Image (cartoon, rainbow, N blue to C red):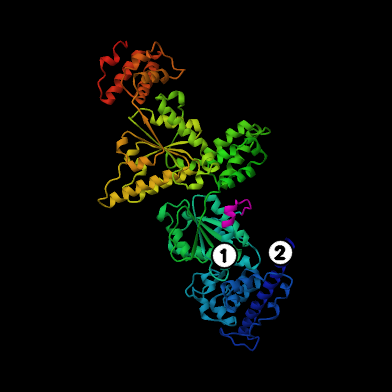
Amino acid sequence: MSPPAARTWIDANQHFLSASLAVVRLALEQYVAGLRGATGGTAGGEKGGAPVAQSGPMGNAPFEAVSSPPAIQTLCRAFGLSDFERDVLLMCAGIELEASFASLCAEAHGDPRRPYPTFSLALAVLPGAHWTALTPASPLRRWRFVEVGAGDALTTSALRIDERILHYLTGVAYIDERLRGLAQPVPATTDLPPSHRALAGRIAQLWSRSAAGVPPLIQMCGSEHAGKRAIAASACAALGLELHAIRAHDLPGAAAEREALGRLWEREAVLSGVALLIDCDDADGPDGSAAALAFVDSMRAMLFVASRDPLRIRTRLFIRLDVAKPTADEQQVLWHRALGPSAQALNGQLQDVVAQFNLGIHGIYAVSAGILTPSVPGEGGPAAVPDVLRGALWEACRAQARPRLDDLAQRIDPAATWDDLVLPGPQRQLLRDIAGHLRRRSLVYDTWGFSAKGARGLGISALFTGASGTGKTMAAEVLAQELRLDLYRIDLSQVVSKYIGETEKNLRRVFDAAEEGGAILLFDEADALFGKRSEVKDSHDRYANIEISYLLQRMEAYRGLAVLTTNMKNALDTTFMRRIRFIVQFPFPDAIQRAEIWRRIFPASTPTDNLDAEKLARLNVAGGNIRNIALHAAFLAADNGEPVRMAHLLRAARSEYAKLEQPLTETEIGGWA
């Protein structure tokens, strides 16, 4: 509605409201006159004067040039108010809008201390009176149009119009103050990818077809939080509605409070033309969404429910829609829009970014805004230098994808490089092959068409097997450093649960959170979870096998790299081994490899004096133990104010062997000092 048209409607509505109030005021005046004996009416609480006219000032003449009816008529039609209930509401509005109503009410009551309307007065004064208007189920009280004050009796208690309804009648539009703190507006966007735009169009079509009845609830599932909101807002905009969202955690737990909130929202949906989205994305399981489900089941307004997993909606007719992240091609288009002219400087890197990071609309625009913002006022930001832009884009995508996974796993900042890794040639080549698979997966899967054959088996998984300290975790760090990816260690003690079904839920949370950034997942000591599947003897064995099967399915579909480490390769199920793409055996280092580890173990800035790598290699320990000995020796030397010498290493070696409960032989340390 343009401003002139709005002004015309406001003026017409004000004229109509004044005329309507005048009719009710006339009824009050006639009643009071009857009490005074000024007319032929009778006193003593019976009606005085002539019946209230329903024409004249109540006509629609001011609205002949306006498309929308007056507010009071819209209210009566939408909520089914009778003529008597309408006049009760107008009597209460008159108290707030015209001073004469208060004095007339006081005189009608015969008590100057009662300048307010009551149901008793309305029954005596207004035509068409009916007792059902007083009940809690009547529109006046069900929809909280009027509030009944505290008193000895229902009919003699003061009536007061609800503030939101009063302003609505005068033509003032706003969201009820009691709802604004809970429900936040969700602005519509026109920048939706085609897949999301199609979902928004489907919702708008579904709701437009059910305009005469209660529209079906739309349940949107998936991990694309911002996308679900954008789709809902776009569908509402197509229908001329505004969307507001409320978090499930903010809904009251008490049934009476939920019912009151529901009535307020249903009322507001009619008054303001709004729809509501219940955001259950952060609700923790069924208990966290219990209040939302109870709220939804009792509501009859236009509703969306957004959740990661489907919720059991019991009484409402609902349509379930799965909302995925934009497709790879759509993400490419979004990146170009968000980066603008700077996208040309990336020289094709966007394809690698899309292949690695599965970001939604919000994530793409957030990253773009961050890297295009100048770091120093008056100077160009990263976009000013193409090489800087490329690096900044990749790192910003990593940071954008971290928050959810940081809550579920331990992030390891990789520091190791290929030079730090001492392994035989075949093992090093296997690790480089893993890196190559991750770098070129977009080319092979998408461009060369392997993904068109099905998603099964496209996940890249590796099993690192070998004794403790042989470099399995370091190898994962090397891959993360090489590929510039985040590395997360999964704490199996937090994942595996004795309760049936909980392990799968925990694994799902980890993989879902990791999908956005394609992080490297390191399941340390994986044999604790992925041991040989046992013969089914009871329900616990059956569910243990289900947990393993679920993990295998997620690994095969995971877009990143899942690294599993174990000290006991033979404990793994052969079916599980078949689904692993790479198996890297980390052998116990021989003397030559141990000598090489000793040559690389000390940083260049560490002062050393006359260290003999060949003698140190006689210590029959793995690389992890070598690092412990070197670090201990460095502290001993630093405490003495000396460079690291063989004597410090001897003392550190004795301490490490004692920890391992192994004897330190003369063959190993002979001639050290």
User: Callout 1, which amino acid?
Assistant: Trp
Q: Secondary structure at mark 2?
A: helix
In depth, the one of 280 and 77 nearer the eye is: 280
- Image position, residue 362 (x, y; %): 57, 46
Is residue 190 a member of the stretch shown in magenta? yes
Is residue 278 a member of the stretch shown in magenta? no
Q: In terms of image quadrants, where is residue 328? A: top right
**Residue at image coords 31%, 23%:** 656
What residue range appears in magenta?
Answer: 188-199
Q: Secondary structure at mark 1?
A: helix
**Against 525, is 304 above or below?**
below
- Image position, residue 304 (x, y; %): 52, 59
Which residue is the site of mark 2?
6
Which residue is the site of mark 1?
207
**Residue at image coords 46%, 44%:** 513
- Image position, residue 459 (x, y; %): 45, 42
In depth, the one of 577 and 229 nearer the eye is: 577
Q: In terms of image quadrants, where is residue 596? A: top left
Q: Is residue 43 left or right of residue 556?
A: right
Q: Earlier in the sequence, mark 1 or mark 2?
A: 2
**Against 386, is 287 above or below?**
below
- Image position, residue 308 (x, y; %): 47, 52
Q: Is residue 585 visible?
A: yes
Number of numbered callouts drawn: 2
Q: Marks 2 and 1: in contact by CB < 8 Å? A: no
Q: Residues within 10 Å of mark 1 (few under 14, many from 20)?
A: many
**Residue at image coords 59%, 80%:** 126
Quadrant placement of the N terminus:
bottom right
The residue sitting at the bottom extreme is 40
